[in-house]
Image (cartoon, rainbow, N blue to C red):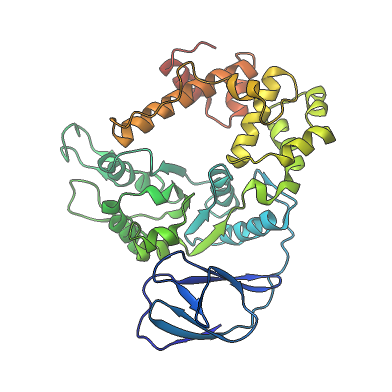
Amino acid sequence: MNLSSEESAVPRFHCEMKSEQKGARARAQDERPGTYVDGVRWRQSRARGRSGSTGGHSSARHGMQVAPEPAAAQATFGELVATSAAARASFERMACAAACNATVLLEGETGTGKSRAALAIHRAGARANAPFLVVDCGALPPNLLESELFGHEKGAFTGAILRRVGAFEEADGGTIFLDEIGELPAELQPKLLRVLENREIRRLGSNTYQAVNVRVIAATHRDLRAEVQAGRFRADLFFRLAVVGIPLPSLRERTEDIPLIVEHILAGLGATPEQLAKLTTPDFLTRLQRAAWPGNVRELRNHLERCLVFQRALPPTAPDAVNALAPAVPRMVDASLTYAESRRRALETFEHDYVDALLKLHGGKVSQAAAAADMDRVYLYRLLRRHGLKS
């Protein structure tokens, strides 16, 4: 694609081009003053030739000759399975990313499997035997998150009685997975940018930098381009993160994958042949394919776990399926609390309910439950003690 502009600069993003089998599709950002083609404001279009496009007060002429992308042939990647072209194309990108050390940005809705994709990329690469550390950028307040990422020296702040090694140091030689990178506070964004550019960190309370050898994989459910447009996310950090961008399609975009995913999930949950036969009938699978699944694969997995608990094929929208494991207290949001405190309480409720249901599903056998949940047994025991649950 050749671009020329009558203006010296075009601010931020006005549109993005995506190569598809039928040609190139352009999508405009929903931002004032807008993007125009031949004087008409537009949101989405398929390029067919040469036309004039303007973003704000600038004007650009473009002509495109885009070859269609080859169809992906990879049907599995790590624990991920698919038959749809969209998902298999993502697997193909993951395989390419695993073969190098470039920074990866996984983009997709909540529950599309970004964490499993990150782990699969790590395990398929040269760093497979090195550490794989996960940091949820939305789970901690900024002061604690900075210490979690970069570590701190003794006395760096009140309560810092010992020196602490941060996640970047701990993951040295391996991979660090920054989940929900779109939630990273503005004050930490330039510090992360320096790490990505120079591969060096500075602990809180220290005056010296030290080199780290880590592979960075980030994930977000947000549209980071829109966040950059709105000024909530640094453009330079976005470009550093999106060296290899991998979109993960939602479940509603690949309903043909549901039968295969169902079998894979049930096998992982230890379903018996009788249970597997009951939950893979054509009628039940058709109902699953027609459901909306706003929580994507994670929601589908939770529903299948409920079906195993109640020993029957529950409809996706059945009231007993939704309410059987609901918390005893109604779900309410207390806006008088800080975001961090409100999130902490919600996570505690989820942990309690999930671990309780997990143990019931596996007859109170902690080792079996931990293996099915892909969780360390020691950590599961810790959750049981924290929430006062008994195996």
Q: Which is nearer the eye, 377 or 234?
A: 234
Residue at the top extreme? 390
Q: Which is nearer the eye, 14 or 279?
A: 14
Q: Which is nearer the eye, 280 or 355?
A: 280
Task: Find residue 318 and report its horizontal and vertical position in percent.
Answer: 67, 26
Marker count (numbered): 0
92 to the left or right of 232: right
Q: Looking at the rendering, in which quadrant would you find the N terminus?
A: bottom right
Q: Quadrant of residue 331?
A: top left
In this view, 148 is above or below 225: above
Residue at the front extreme? 40
In this view, 349 is above or below 206: above
Q: Quadrant of residue 232?
A: bottom left
In this view, 314 is above or below 220: above
**Which residue sits at x=71%, y=69%?**
70
**Which residue sits at x=69%, y=34%?**
265
